[in-house]
Image (cartoon, grey):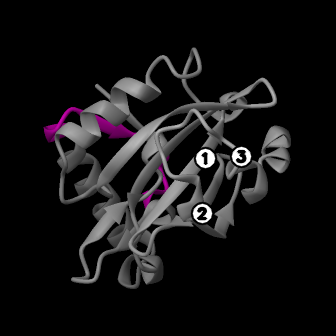
Amino acid sequence: METLKYISKAKLKLVNDAGFETGKIGKLLGSGAEGKVYEYMEDRIIKVISKKNLIFPEPGELFLPLMKHLKKTPHKLISKVYGYGTFYVERMKYYYYISEKLNECKGINKMSGAAKCKEEWMIQQQLRKISLYFNDNQIDKHLMEDNDGNRKIIDLNGLELI
């Protein structure tokens, strides 16, 4: 997480070689151990992840193929991917993806015990059907809802191709 403090909105707007329009980056929506999330256009977000914060064996080795797969084969359970790639700021490599902007998730966050475990198990089973696995056993913390109330996984870099 240490490197992420250096990637500000101002620095993002200076990036020339990325596959996104820097002028469309809006306010910071959140940040954590995995990266920073900014508004991007009215209905999208952009998540920026430093090379050091990728969980894969070799940073980027699995991220780019995963994003390619998610963009090519969208699924109702996963936030839609509009774009992805890499860029450099001051010789530090960053990964990003652009996905749909979603709303706070209601129901599942209030679940506990067996009901919560069952919901998470059902989500993992649906992911397995499309050759994916989510590597966090607390899926509820990584879900948001679209305008129709459909729950979707938002931390896409937490998914793995299986």
Residue 84 in the image: state x and y as whole percent: 43, 39
- From the image, tell me which residue sits under label 1: 48
- From the image, tell me which residue sits under label 3: 14
Q: Which stretch did the figure color magenta? A: 128-139
Label pair 2/1, CB-CB below 8 angstroms: yes
State the residue at coordinates (30%, 76%): 146
Observer able to see residue 135: no
Dot 2: what SS?
A: strand
Quadrant of the rendered image containing residue 8? bottom right
Label pair 1/3, CB-CB below 8 angstroms: no
Dot 1: what SS?
A: strand
Q: Nearer the viewer, mark 1 or mark 3?
A: 3
Of the pair 15 and 103, the residue shown nearer to us: 15
Amino acid type, mark 1: Val
Q: Is residue 67 within the magenta segment?
A: no
Relative placement, left or right, of 39 versus 115 is: right
State the residue at coordinates (16%, 38%): 130
